[in-house]
C-alpha cells in the first residue's frame, strides 16, 4: 500500500518540475504568460498522473475480496453481488493525456455475467 518510497518519489517528481521550469524559463526569457503556463501544465500533468495512480492503488478498493459481502459492489442490471474474478490491469488516460495503470479486482455478476472494472 503506502511506503516511504512513494513519499520520496513524490518529492522527486515535484523537484523535477521545479528544476525543469527554472531551466525552461532560463532558456525562454521572453516567453509569454500563456507559453509559461503551457510548459508548466505539461510538467504538472505527469506528476498529477503519478499521484493519482499511487493514490488509487493505495485504496482497499483495489481488491474486492478484502471487502465484506455486504460492502461488495452489485450488478447494475440485476442487483446480484458481484464475485471477484482475478486481478486485471488496465491503462487509463487522465487529464493532460497522461496514462495511469491500475491493477484491480475484475468483478463479475454470477447471474448475468456482466464484468466490472474497477468495481464500484
Image (tube, grey):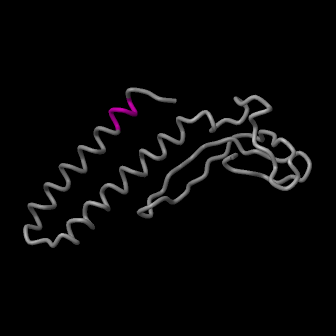
Magenta segment, prevailing SS (helix, strand or loop): helix
- On the rendered structure, is 48 left or right of 25? right
Q: Quadrant of residue 30?
A: bottom left
State the image coordinates of residue 21 (x, y, percent, origin top left).
19, 56
47 in the magenta segment? no
Left or right of 93: which side holds 79? right
- Position of 26 compared to 4: left or right? left
The residue sitting at the right extreme is: 111
Against 52, residue 32 (above or below) is below
Let me know if residue 6 is in the magenta part.
yes
How many numbered dots are placed on residues in this image? 0
Q: Residue at x 29, y 38 (%)?
A: 11
Which residue shows up at 78% across the image and 41% down it?
85
Identify which residue is drawn at 62% across, 47% down: 89
What is the magenta range? 5-9
Residue 96: image quadrant is bottom left
The answer to whether 84 is drawn above or below residue 39 in the figure is above
Where is residue 78 shown, x and y percent of the image? 88, 52
Q: Nearer the viewer, residue 42 or 85?
A: 42
Amino acid at each position: 500500500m503506502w511506503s516511504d518510497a512513494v513519499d520520496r518519489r513524490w518529492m522527486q517528481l515535484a523537484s523535477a518540475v521545479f528544476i525543469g521550469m527554472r531551466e525552461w524559463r532560463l532558456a525562454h526569457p521572453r516567453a509569454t504568460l500563456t507559453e509559461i503556463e503551457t510548459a508548466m501544465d505539461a510538467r504538472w500533468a505527469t506528476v498529477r498522473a503519478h499521484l493519482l495512480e499511487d493514490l488509487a492503488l493505495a485504496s482497499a478498493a483495489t481488491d474486492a475480496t478484502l471487502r465484506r459481502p455486504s460492502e461488495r459492489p452489485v450488478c447494475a442490471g440485476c442487483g446480484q453481488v458481484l464475485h471477484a474474478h482475478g486481478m486485471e490491469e488496465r491503462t487509463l488516460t487522465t487529464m493532460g493525456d497522461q496514462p495511469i495503470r491500475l491493477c484491480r479486482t475484475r468483478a463479475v455478476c454470477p447471474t448475468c455475467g456482466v464484468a466490472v472494472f474497477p468495481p464500484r
